[in-house]
Image: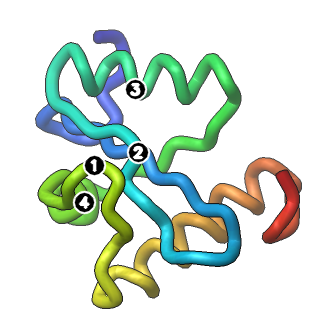
Amino acid sequence: MKNVVNPPDIAVALTYDGTKAPRVTAKGRGHTAEKIIDLAKEHNIPLHTDVMLVNVLSKISLGDEIPRELYLAIAEVIAFAYLLSGKRPGEQ
């Protein structure tokens, strides 16, 4: 892997539609993390590095919403992604 985003090779992908809490849509370590990161880059999805947050998110089951305790942290990540993409919340 060329650029590891979150040592030790962990990646978690979230989806957020603006109506419900964000959900974990993909997660993995090693080769799986590499694939998640490569797909994000391919589709110009902003990547965010936060080792502690990704470790917590990696414990959430696929398809599950993030817990309330993570709302503020994830809101900051979503705001970061919107800022980088030039989109506004709710835009697809």
Which label number is shown at residue 25? Answer: 2
Which label number is shown at residue 41? Answer: none
Label 3 sits on residue: 36
| Other residues around mark 2 within 10 Å, as few (<14) / some (14–19) / many (≥20) | some
The answer to whether residue 64 is above or below residue 76 is above
Q: The residue tagged with tag 2: helix, strand or loop? A: strand
Q: Residue 41 is drawn in which quadrant?
A: top right
Earlier in the chain: of badge 1 and badge 4, it is 4
Q: Residue at x 87, y 59 (%)?
A: 91
Q: Position of residue 51 (x, y in %)?
A: 23, 55
Circles 4 and 3, Cβ within 8 Å, touching? The answer is no
Q: Quadrant of the N terminus?
A: top left
Label 4 sits on residue: 57
Give the alpha-carbon distance from disc 1 to disc 4, as whole Å. Answer: 10 Å
Give the alpha-carbon distance from disc 3 to disc 1, as whole Å. Answer: 14 Å
Label 1 sits on residue: 62
The amino acid type, in three-letter code, at marker 3 is: Ile
The answer to whether residue 79 is above or below residue 50 is below
In front: 23, or 7? 23
Q: Residue at x 45, y 86 (%)?
A: 72
Earlier in the chain: of badge 2 and badge 3, it is 2
Give the alpha-carbon distance from disc 2 to disc 4, as whole Å. Answer: 11 Å
Circles 2 and 3, Cβ within 8 Å, touching? The answer is no
Q: Position of residue 46 (x, y in %)?
A: 61, 43
Q: Position of residue 64 (x, y in %)?
A: 32, 62
